[in-house]
Each structure stands twice: as C-alpha cells, then as structure tokens.
Amino acid sequence: MRAMQSPHASNQPRVVLLGTGGTIAGSGTSGAAVGAGSAAYQSAVVTAQDLIAGVPGLSALAELQAEQIFQIDSADFTDEHLLRLARRVAALCARADVDAVVITHGTDTMEETAYFLHLTVPSGKPIVLTGAMRPGTALAADGPANLLHAVAVAAHPSSAGRGVLVVMNEEIHSGRDVAKAHSLRMDAFASPHGALGAVVEGAPRWYRRVERAHGKTSEFDIDRIDALPLVGLVASHGNMRVEIYDSWAALGARAIVHAGFGGGTVPDYLKAPLAGLRARGVLLVRCSRTGDGPVVRNASIDDDAHGWVVADDQNAPRARLLAALALSRSSDPAAVQAVFLRY
Ligand code: ASP
C-alpha cells in the first residue's frame, strides 16, 4: 500500500484512532451460544490503545496512533461532544503527518455523529467511523473485524474525498445516509440509497458516490461554529398534544423537527396551533417518521403559507442537526429550505 502524504519512516499511511466508547469498547460475560453475551454488558471500558492491541492485523495496514477523546455510551453524546469531536477531527485532518482518522463509536448515535462530521469537517482525508453490535467478550464479537475493515478503508487512497464513512459488517456507508435500523443484529446499519461500497478481501470496493455537498464543499466549517442553536424533535403518533411543541418553544428552540406520518403530514387538529409557531420565531421542519423517502414541499400542506420547511429525505435525528447548522447561519425559512435541498 502507498503512503498517502509525504514519505516517512515506515511508508505506511498514518491513521489516528479516536476512541469515544460504545459497545466496541464494551465488556461483559461470554455466553455459551453464538450471540449470547451480546445484550448485557458494560459499554465504554476498553481503551483505544487496547482496541488496537487486540487486532494484530492492524499493524500491516497503517501506522496507528491511539487517542481517547471520550469513553462513553453513545447515548450520552450531547451537542458539546459533537462540537468537541468535530474540532479534534478537523485539527487532526489539517496535519501533514495524519493521513486519515478512524473513530470508534457506540452504534446507537453513530449516524448523528457521522452526519455532523460529514457536514462540518472541511477535509477530503478519509474519516471513518466504526463500532460493534457485540462487546469484545461475546462469542462472535464483531468489533475486531469492523475495526480492521475501518482501518483498511481509512488507509486506502481510494477513500479520500467521499465524505465521512461508516464501516460496519463489511459494508461502507455514507455519513449522509446511514442509520441504525436494527437493535441487535450484526447487519444493523442500512442506507436508504444503498451502501457506497463493500470491504472485499480486505480492501474497499466502491459502487457509488454521494452527490450532495459535504466536507470541503460544505458551508459549515466547525472552526466557525461556537455552539448549536436549540432544535427540538417531536415524533408523530395518534392523539398528539400541541403542548409538547409549546414546551420546545418555551425552552427557546429555534426550530422543531416534526417527524410526521408518511410524507411528513400534520394532523388537521394541530395545523392551526402549529401555525402560531412562526410568530414565536420557531421554524417547523417536516420530515417523515418512516425514516426513508423525501417529504415534498407544498404537497399535502401549504408550506409556503405556513413558512415551514421540508427535510427532503433526511431522517428526524439528522434533520435536527442540519436544521441547527442552517440556523447557525440564517433563520430565513427560504435559506433553511435551500440547505435541506443542498446537503
Ligand atoms: N449503547 C451502545 C452505544 O451506542 C450500543 C453500541 O455501541 O452498539 O454506545
């Protein structure tokens, strides 16, 4: 394998492994059956350095340096964690002696972190997230192979310029699209438009590229973002209550993502109360609670008249992040709408 930047002692790509915790760093009692020991364990206990030591094949792929930025379950990620991680990844990518970054992360919120980095780190160097559905102590643990594949993808020159990648279960997904779609299975990750590629015989094989803006073509540079505006999220169900939206508004939310039924619909009994949000400076962003497929502007609802925005094909958690980034630049609904169609 070729070095991706200036020549150095080992001539291997230099990859920084940032450990954040999650099940890949988890430990529990081994079960006797395949899969046993996969649900009850303590997450975020094994260090990034020990994860590297546990996969000897890594040294053949890259010169690795471990850094423990957090040691948490990914459910505990806040916007502050996202901002800190993005700043660190951007700083590492700016260094001439770093060719790529691999981030080990809990699977529960990996899609949010991957998307945030995809939008805010202005670099074309490979940035790859991976994790595990089973702790290292479970039979058939998936962490070691996922880590090996993540480093193989990060170290490969063909991975540059594709945006942030998620490597899980031998598949390579885009941080724009991927979502955790199963609570337990090893093939828990899926992208509505399909994976970008696969890890075949230890190397990436690509099948498609992401069309939308990211990385160097994104207007959201982490070095110019101090904090994220508050954006709420409300999932649709029968018998909804407007007070939930009012609570977000009272908390100071600048937008509320409404994960509506089907095409992002709003029940008739909520239309009039929600119309009042605009006057309070709160933008409603309509997405679909199905998690797949676009929401079409001005189709079943007159978004122009309400001053509302549609999230295109973004799922609710990612729509929250994109709305926050858009609002960090402008609160004009037309500008926010343009962002949802560009990213
Ligand atoms: N609860 C864990 C986490 O997201 C689950 C996992 O990593 O698979 O940190």
Image: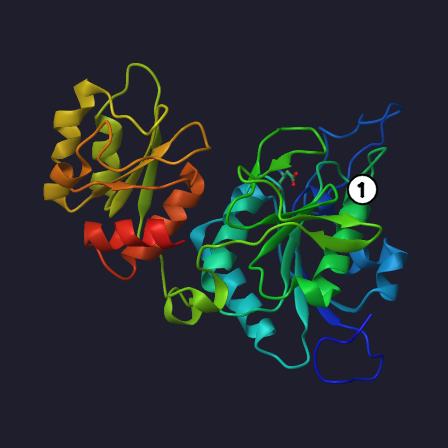
Number of numbered discs: 1
Q: Provide residue 41's location: percent of width, then percent of height.
A: 73, 34
Q: Is residue 67 visible?
A: no
Front position in the image: 195 or 37: 195
Which quadrant is home to the N terminus?
bottom right
Which picture quadrant has residue 61? bottom right
Please tell me which residue is depicted at 68% across the width and 80% down the height of the picture.
97
Q: Provide residue 11's location: percent of width, then percent of height.
A: 82, 79
User: Vertically, is 110 above or below 242?
Assistant: below
Front position in the image: 322 or 136: 322
User: Vertically, is 179 above or below 19?
Assistant: above
Q: Is residue 70 visible?
A: yes
Please tell me which residue is depicted at 77% across the width and 85% down the height of the picture.
7
Residue at mark 1: 136
User: Vertically, is 83 above or below 25?
Assistant: below
Which picture quadrant has residue 229? bottom left
Left/right placement of residue 268 relative to residue 137 reads left
Q: Amino acid at mark 1?
A: Gly
Left/right placement of residue 283 relative to residue 316 reads left
Left/right placement of residue 284 relative to residue 144 reads left
Please tell me which residue is depicted at 57% across the width and 57% down the height of the picture.
164
